[in-house]
Amino acid sequence: DAGVIQSPRHEVTEMGQEVTLRCKPISGHNSLFWYRQTMMRGLELLIYFNNNVPIDDSGMPEDRFSAKMPNASFSTLKIQPSEPRDSAVYFCASRPPPGSNYGYTFGSGTRLTVV
Amino acid sequence: AQSVTQLGSHVSVSEGALVLLRCNYSSSVPPYLFWYVQYPNQGLQLLLKYTTGATLVKGINGFEAEFKKSETSFHLTKPSAHMSDAAEYFCALKGTGNQFYFGTGTSLTVIP
């Protein structure tokens, strides 16, 4: 099991550019979460999907952020246009349906730096 | 290799009893360690963190954790459980290059 796979691991981009972060959840997991981590604010839930459907996107900071999950094995988080304050580590996590080993598995994160 | 292992995916305690959630880590560098809590339908919130200095760290809601290098552990405790403590708890490690590693979580049930 390769775990939750995120790409890229590191991204450095200029302010105003579009950034796309990618996530492949564990096969069989039906919930997927995008988190943003900063030392100031800790982990913030941005959005989560259940069975590919966005359930709660109230954590998405503003319209510059969007997320999609076109199928059960892939999700993207897009920032357009990016700003320096978006610099953070972005985590994707997935978990299986209730009743099994109902624990999160986190990806290794994407460290985004916007200059 | 850097990793975090949480022992026990489910823990049940009676109201008023001691809460002990276990976390062991593996790290090739001095670790920064965190405990997060997630209440139903919410995101993860930081409970406490250890970076350097005092090995006994106090957090919110009466929780504390002790960093024990010799045991590579960072167990979370609370002397007396409240019903409101029922949640899921995550141990995390910040390793090299700002990389974060999370445990799979421990679900705490408090029995009245």
Image (cartoon, rainbow, N blue to C red):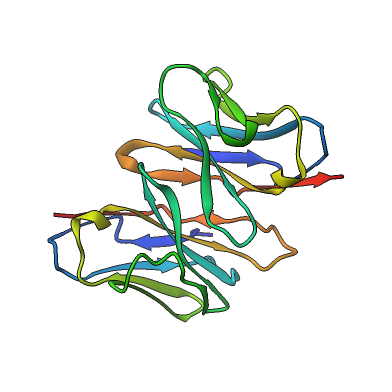
The N terminus of chain B, quarter of image: top left
The C terminus of chain B, quarter of image: top right
Task: Indicate whether A8 appears above or below B35.
Answer: below
Quarter location, residue A61: bottom left
**Residue A75 drawn at (x, y percent):** 42, 73
Q: Residue at coordinates 77% horizontally, 45% vertically from top-left?
A: B83
**Residue B104 drawn at (x, y percent):** 59, 49
Q: Residue at coordinates 30% horizontally, 40% vertically from top-left?
A: B97
Task: Indicate whether A9 appears above or below B49.
Answer: below
Quarter location, residue B15: top right
Q: Is residue A25 left or right of residue A80?
A: right
Q: Which is more toward the observer, B91 or B36? A: B36
Determine the residue located farthest toward the right in the rendered image: B112
Quarter location, residue A17: bottom left
Q: Which is more toward the observer, B60 or A77? A: B60
Task: Indicate whether A96 appears above or below B72.
Answer: below
**Residue B87 drawn at (x, y percent):** 67, 49
Determine the residue located farthest toward the bottom in the rendered image: A70
**Residue A98 drawn at (x, y percent):** 71, 65
Q: Which is more toward the observer, A37 or B9? A: A37
Q: Is residue A1 left or right of residue B108?
A: left
Q: Residue at coordinates 46% horizontally, 71% vertically from top-left?
A: A57
Task: Indicate whether A83 appears above or below B88.
Answer: below
Examine the rendering and report whether any part of residue B10 can be seen: no
Q: Residue at coordinates 41% horizontally, 21% vertically from top-left?
A: B52
